[in-house]
Amino acid sequence: MLEINHLSYQVEGEEGQELGILNDVSLSVKDHQFVVITGPNGGGKTTLAKAIMGLVKPTGGTIRWNDTDITDLDITGRARLGISYGFQQPPRFKGLKVKDLLALAAGSDKLTREEGCQYLTKVGLCAGDYIDREVDASLSGGEVKRIEIATILARKTGLMIFDEPEAGIDLWSFAKLTETFKLIHQKREATLIVISHQERIIDLADEIVMIADGKVQKQGPKDEIFPQILANTRTSCSYLSEGAK
């Protein structure tokens, strides 16, 4: 279980003033849940995800994973506890082949070619076409994204965090992406936290957390929260349309 209590993250503004990126954020995520974090751009979603992974250090509050306080742990320590992170723009590694990246993710130099191919197949890639390729600029954004997801699957972590996984990928890749998330959740292989604005991803969630202005504005079951978000969006659009007349 992931427990976040009164988490804050402040940075210094250009004029020396304190700017609150996260402001007293508290939430909990039960084991094997699929939670989507959504909300307006600049609201603090990515910062929250990075704080969970240890990519940014909060200025207040605590983070606990499976009853262990991880607030002061570095990225390596959190990874060892079974937490993984998928970036909006995954890194590329010139000279490193996909099969080697998968072996590193699995933590074993004994990962067989067949096992590596199975992970690629799970994310909708033709394994024979990719297993020996380098993770470099010759791959499209969607291909790199799915290879990154394959490495996370190879790690078999208990908590998987994905930051806008739909960013920069084509519609076909997006369809495969949602299928992969759905399969992970159906098999209860991990707890999933996905930052997204996409309705098709939100629709897969058990719970939705809406963050704006660095605070949790709404949290609850998808069937309860999603209609509220849609209603608010329509109201805002209607207001803007009236104002333009």
Image: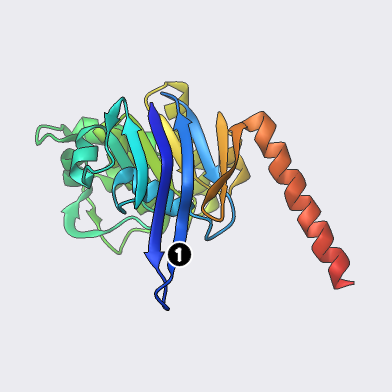
Which is nearer the eye, 191 or 56?
56
Q: Residue at x 78, y 58 (%)?
A: 237
Q: Position of residue 131 (x, y in %)?
A: 24, 44
Q: Residue furthest bottom?
A: 15
On screen, residue 111 versus residue 183, left or right, reads: left
Q: Residue at x 16, y 45 (%)?
A: 100
Q: Residue furthest top?
A: 187
- Is residue 88 at least partly visible in the picture? no
Which is nearer the eye, 81 or 187?
81
- Is residue 58 at least partly visible in the picture? yes
Q: Quadrant of residue 13?
A: bottom left
Q: Position of residue 142 (x, y in %)?
A: 42, 53
Quadrant including the C terminus:
bottom right
Q: Residue furthest front?
A: 17
Report the number of numbered marks: 1
Q: Residue at x 36, y 48 (%)?
A: 60
Relative height, residue 41 to residue 111 (above, below):
below
Amino acid at circle 1: Leu
Q: Position of residue 21 (x, y in %)?
A: 46, 58
Which residue does the numbered mark 1 point to in the structure image?
19
On screen, residue 155 versus residue 15, left or right, reads: left
On screen, residue 11 versus residue 116, left or right, reads: right
